[in-house]
Image (tube, rainbow, N blue to C red):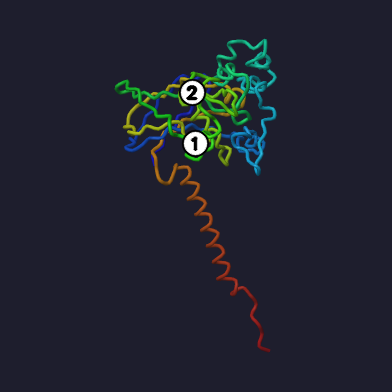
Amino acid sequence: MSETSVDYTAGDVQREFVLEKGIDGEALISYELPDVLVNQKRFVESKDNYIVGSTISRYTCEDAEIEDVGWRRCPSPPGSEECARWRGCPHGPDCPEDAIQSDPILRRVANTSSFRPCGLVALSMFTDRYRLVRLEDGLEISLTESGVALGSQDDVYDERVLRTSGGVGAGAELTVEGVPSWLTLEDGFYEHFKVWSRQPASPRVRNLWATVPDGLRSGRYRLEFTENSRVWTDAWKVPFKRVTISEAHVLGSSGACVFLGGLCLGICCLEAIMTCIFLFAPMLAPRASLL
């Protein structure tokens, strides 16, 4: 399986890389976040109960309502002077306009009267955006962002997050329980939210962001970061962010194959050890005397 990774941090505008092996079939563009605790119980349960809740599983948005969006999305460490300006955003009387414009979620919440969907999962949504250019001829590669969510997610969210008959932008395109939502259809934002809402079992996030149906030929490319949020690396102390370009494969990613292969190899080793124990155990046992 062919995989090429590009690491970046806040402040990066673009990165160049070489795709040594072309991808003939569909190419997958994914983002990765290492060492994040999105698999913690408190985080996973902080979702909009109206959308994903049931009689068995109950969710809550405690400490993740509209008044918490500003200080939690602040790109500086908590308690800093900058974050003090963000507290109460976007509807606080002292919320600066530059703070609102600097974050994609704040820009959208500023046009609504509530934060729906709510919760820490929604509040921490990954919002970076990318543009891919082939350097040989300057061609911008078309990235397909639609259809990246699982069909099961479409069934859940599209029944609860309803589209309005008109209007464009946050608070005008989608509603949750009859309340205008901060989610938008622009740039596949709603589709990316559905993908983000499905937490991994490990502290490493890897989500599909877009596809290139016609594949990619080998050569030099430039990955441009049209949106590069500071909050992940500056405030939440993620060491780096990563974009991975890979080929679609029936066995999944190379990382998944390495994990499953290592697991199977470990089980085989244990079976070999147990086999040796059962074979040699009778030889070590004391023999009964005939006298």
From the viewer's perspective, tell me whether residue 190 is left or right of residue 78. Answer: left
Rendered-image quadrant of the N terminus: top left
- Image height of 197 relative to 179, above or below: below
Residue that sits furthest to the front in the current view: 165
Report which quarter residue 61 is drawn in: top right
**Image x and y of residue 98, in percent:** 58, 11
From the viewer's perspective, tell me whether residue 9 is left or right of residue 245. Answer: right
The circle on residue 88 is none
Report which quarter residue 36 is drawn in: top right
Residue type pointed to by label 2: Ser
From the viewer's perspective, tell me whether residue 234 is left or right of residue 78. Answer: left
Distance Cα–Cα, label 1 vs label 2: 19 Å
**Image x and y of residue 59, in percent:** 66, 36
Report which quarter residue 234 is drawn in: top right
According to the picture, the residue beneath numbered tag 1 turns out to be 154
Which secondary structure lies at badge 1? helix
Q: Residue at x 36, y 36 (%)?
A: 26
According to the picture, the residue beneath numbered tag 2 turns out to be 165
Residue type pointed to by label 1: Asp
Rendered-image quadrant of the C terminus: bottom right
- Cβ–Cβ under 8 Å for marks 1 and 2: no
Residue closest to the eye, 266 or 252: 252
Answer with mark 1 or mark 2, whichever residue precedes in sequence: 1
Q: Residue at x 40, y 29 (%)?
A: 144
Residue that sits furthest to the bottom in the current view: 291
**Image x and y of residue 11, in percent:** 52, 19
- Image height of 41 relative to 89, above or below: below
- Image height of 21 relative to 271, above or below: above
**Image x and y of residue 179, in percent:** 60, 24
Foreground tag (1 vs 2): 2
